[in-house]
Image (cartoon, rainbow, N blue to C red):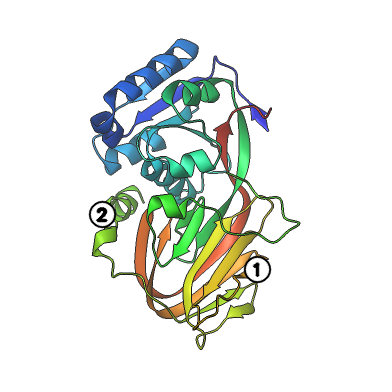
């Protein structure tokens, strides 16, 4: 783990949704950060300016003030420019922050800002799909709302899990994610789920849901819930591995805060310790 001195230079990027939704929390967080370190504050008006500010951070340590979408946007940009290895990201959650809190970021602007100043970098695993998309926390099929998506999947025992080209890229990130109320109501699906090449469930067995949770140690936890039969409640099918492939007919999935698809095939691969997040000192 890397520790940080309060004399570090910070690049504070304040997401526009945070400024509009909770200006008071933004002000408090900015004041705490400015009192403890040399800060440069950026106020991007949209995803393109957000990306430009992050790309021009220089030696400054980036701090995102915003919700889960802003955190995912920052990690996605850094990943696609292959800059995650040398960058310790920090976040002060303002807005929907189930993902950030599940990763260990404190709730509340004061506690989160103090963690930025006094915390340590923890290297976390990342799920990367075959379209270069990323998952920081939990992947759900079919899509579910954020509160449900934040619940971790059941995990096999014995694995240590973490508990709780600029313009073209920016255009991709700026496109509106699918609204949940526009997604067809979830129903049973026929999917083939493979973990490290081994079939967990095949197309002949309908399933209610599949969840994949990034772990801490280079593997992901996979839970498949088969469709219950008359008078029967089948147990979830559990697996763990580095590569997860899902095949099916035009399925959608929720990766952290964003709904994607429909797709017919997608593969996610765990990259161990791929990104760094500043968290409070343990204990």
| Mark carried by residue 239 | 1
Q: Residue at x 36, y 63 (%)?
A: 260
Looking at the rendering, which quadrant does residue 195 occupy?
bottom right
| Mark carried by residue 176 | 2
Residue 57 appears in the rendering: no
State which tag comes first along the sequence, 2 or 1: 2
Of marks 2 and 1, the one in the foreground:
1
**Front-most of 176 and 259?**
259
Q: Quadrant of the N terminus?
A: top right
Badge 1 element: strand
User: Given the current orientation, which residue lies at the most extreme front position?
Assistant: 231
Crowding at mark 2 (Cα within 10 Å: few <14, some 14-19, many 20+): few
Q: Residue at x 37, y 39 (%)?
A: 67
Residue 2, x across and y down, in percent: 65, 30
Looking at the rendering, which quadrant does residue 269 occupy?
bottom right
Q: Residue at x 33, y 19 (%)?
A: 27
Q: Answer yes or no: do the residues labelled 2 and 1 have beta carbons within 8 Å?
A: no
Q: Left of 221 or right of it: where is 20?
A: left
Vertical order, 255 against 28 (above or below)? below
**Front-most of 166 and 232?**
232
**Front-most of 9 and 193?**
193
């Amino acid at each position: 783990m890397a520790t940080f001195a309060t004399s570090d230079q910070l690049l504070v990027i304040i997401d526009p949704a945070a400024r509009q939704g909770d200006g008071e929390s933004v002000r408090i967080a900015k004041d705490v950060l400015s009192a403890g370190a040399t800060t440069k504050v950026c106020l991007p008006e949209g995803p393109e300016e957000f990306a430009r500010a992050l790309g021009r951070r220089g030696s400054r340590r980036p701090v995102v003030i915003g919700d889960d979408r802003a955190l995912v946007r920052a990690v996605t940009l850094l990943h696609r420019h292959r800059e995650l290895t040398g960058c310790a990201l920090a976040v002060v959650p303002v807005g929907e922050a189930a993902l950030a809190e599940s990763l260990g970021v404190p709730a509340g602007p004061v506690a989160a800002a103090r963690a930025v100043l006094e915390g340590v970098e923890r290297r976390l695993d990342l799920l990367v799909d075959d379209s270069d998309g990323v998952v920081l926390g939990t992947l759900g099929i079919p899509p579910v709302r954020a509160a449900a998506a934040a619940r971790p999947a059941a995990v096999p025992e014995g694995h240590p899990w973490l508990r709780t080209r600029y313009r073209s890229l920016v255009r991709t990130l700026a496109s509106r994610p699918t609204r949940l109320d526009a997604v067809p109501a979830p129903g049973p699906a026929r999917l083939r789920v493979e973990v490290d090449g081994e079939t967990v469930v095949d197309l002949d067995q309908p399933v209610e849901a599949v969840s994949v949770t990034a772990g801490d140690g280079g593997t992901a936890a996979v839970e498949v819930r088969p469709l219950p039969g008359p008078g029967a409640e089948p147990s979830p099918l559990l697996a763990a591995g580095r590569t997860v492939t899902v095949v099916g007919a035009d399925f959608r999935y929720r990766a952290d805060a964003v709904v994607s698809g429909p797709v017919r095939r997608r593969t996610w691969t765990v990259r161990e310790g791929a990104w760094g997040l500043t968290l409070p000192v343990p204990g």
